Image (cartoon, grey):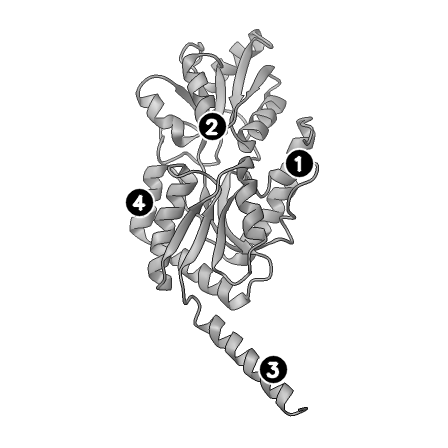
């Protein structure tokens, strides 16, 4: 019996090692924390399809919207760490949730395995055309001349923290109007029920129709979708420290060789010229990285967002 047990253990270890070496042997599910048609969903489908070709297995998109992405993140955190259930995480549900919730439903640093940085969401300061401002300085002057009379909509965690940080830096007084999602916030801005909003590239089509005006990009570089819109720094103001990112994670405890295989496949997908072209048209610059670099980014962003929430006087719920 003493000889049999070690032999069985060796056999089991060999089988497990071979299974990891052959990964993947079946379809992979990529959970997306937003509904079909959202920017995150489009990124997942385009990059996922290219990564699927690298891996030799289908990547199935599973949309799990709800609670600012917390529903999807919780599910993946609890999944078996075998590389077959992954999350396209965002700064909203990973680095902002711990800062905005008294009791976060997961520990970002211990419940997930970083796999690869993916890219950056474009965010802009939009105003209703009735606001007499065609650039940032004119908007700030108008807001300061009318303290408390203007309102801004927020439809996601990034919008909440970004506009609060923006108010802190500029000293303007506007009233927040919260919405359950960005689309209704954008529609009320178009209707003139609010006057400003920091939102994603979904507002681009309304600019072409003359229903909105984009004053500045809050990203460090100009966005390919709206290349004529200046950055905050170009407009004479310091950059916001908000960096709306997306990246690939899995449950904690994933085997290192599986993480390496996934990273190789997704980085190759993101370096595909056709994929980059599609993402440029979406206004979503790709930023492929190693698992280690992405892990450092998450940790840094947790600290930054925690400080910004505190400095803005936002109270965790």
Circle 4 residue: 277
Q: Distance between the residues labelled 1 and 2?
A: 20 Å
Q: Are marks 1 and 3 in contact (CB under 8 Å)?
A: no
Q: Are marks 2 and 3 in contact (CB under 8 Å)?
A: no
Q: Distance between the residues labelled 1 and 3?
A: 44 Å
Local crowd size for mark 2, using a 10 Å CA cut-off: few (<14), some (14–19), many (≥20): many
Circle 2 residue: 182
Towards the viewer: 188 or 78: 78
Q: Earlier in the sequence, mark 1 or mark 3?
A: 3
Circle 3 residue: 9
Tag 4 secondary structure: helix
Can I make out residue 129 in this image? yes
Q: Distance between the residues labelled 4 and 3?
A: 50 Å
In this picture, residue 272 sits left or right of residue 240: left
Towards the viewer: 205 or 223: 205
- Give the number of the mark in front: 1 or 4: 1
Q: Which of marks 4 and 3 is nearer the N terminus?
A: 3
Q: Which of marks 1 and 4 is nearer the N terminus?
A: 1
């Amino acid at each position: 019996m003493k000889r049999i047990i070690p032999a069985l253990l060796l056999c089991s270890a060999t089988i497990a090692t071979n299974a990891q070496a052959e990964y993947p042997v079946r379809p992979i599910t990529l959970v997306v924390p937003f509904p079909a048609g959202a920017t995150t969903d489009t990124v997942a489908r385009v990059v996922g399809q290219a990564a699927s070709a690298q891996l030799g297995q289908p990547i199935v998109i599973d949309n799990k919207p709800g609670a600012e992405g917390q529903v999807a993140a919780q599910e993946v955190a609890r999944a078996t760490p075998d590389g077959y259930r992954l999350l396209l995480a965002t700064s909203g549900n990973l680095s902002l949730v711990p800062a905005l919730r008294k009791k976060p439903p997961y520990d970002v640093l211990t419940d997930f395995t970083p796999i690869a940085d993916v890219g950056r969401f474009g965010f802009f300061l939009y105003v209703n055309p009735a606001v007499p401002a065609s650039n940032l300085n004119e908007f700030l002057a108008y807001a300061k001349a009318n303290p408390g009379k203007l309102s801004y909509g927020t439809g996601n965690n990034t919008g909440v923290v970004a506009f609060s940080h923006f108010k802190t830096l500029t000293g303007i007084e506007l009233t927040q109007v919260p919405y359950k999602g960005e689309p209704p916030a954008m529609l009320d801005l178009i209707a003139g029920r609010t006057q400003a909003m920091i939102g994603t590239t979904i507002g681009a089509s309304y600019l072409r129709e003359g229903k909105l005006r984009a004053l500045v990009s809050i990203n460090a570089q100009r966005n390919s979708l709206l290349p004529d819109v200046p950055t905050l720094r170009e407009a004479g103001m310091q950059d916001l420290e908000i960096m709306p990112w997306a990246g690939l994670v899995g449950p904690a405890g994933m085997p290192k060789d599986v993480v390496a295989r996934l990273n190789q496949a997704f980085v190759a997908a993101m370096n595909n010229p056709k994929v980059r072209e599609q993402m440029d048209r979406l206004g979503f610059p790709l930023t492929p990285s190693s698992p280690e670099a992405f892990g450092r980014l998450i940790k840094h962003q947790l600290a930054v967002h925690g400080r910004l929430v505190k400095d803005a006087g936002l109270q965790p719920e």
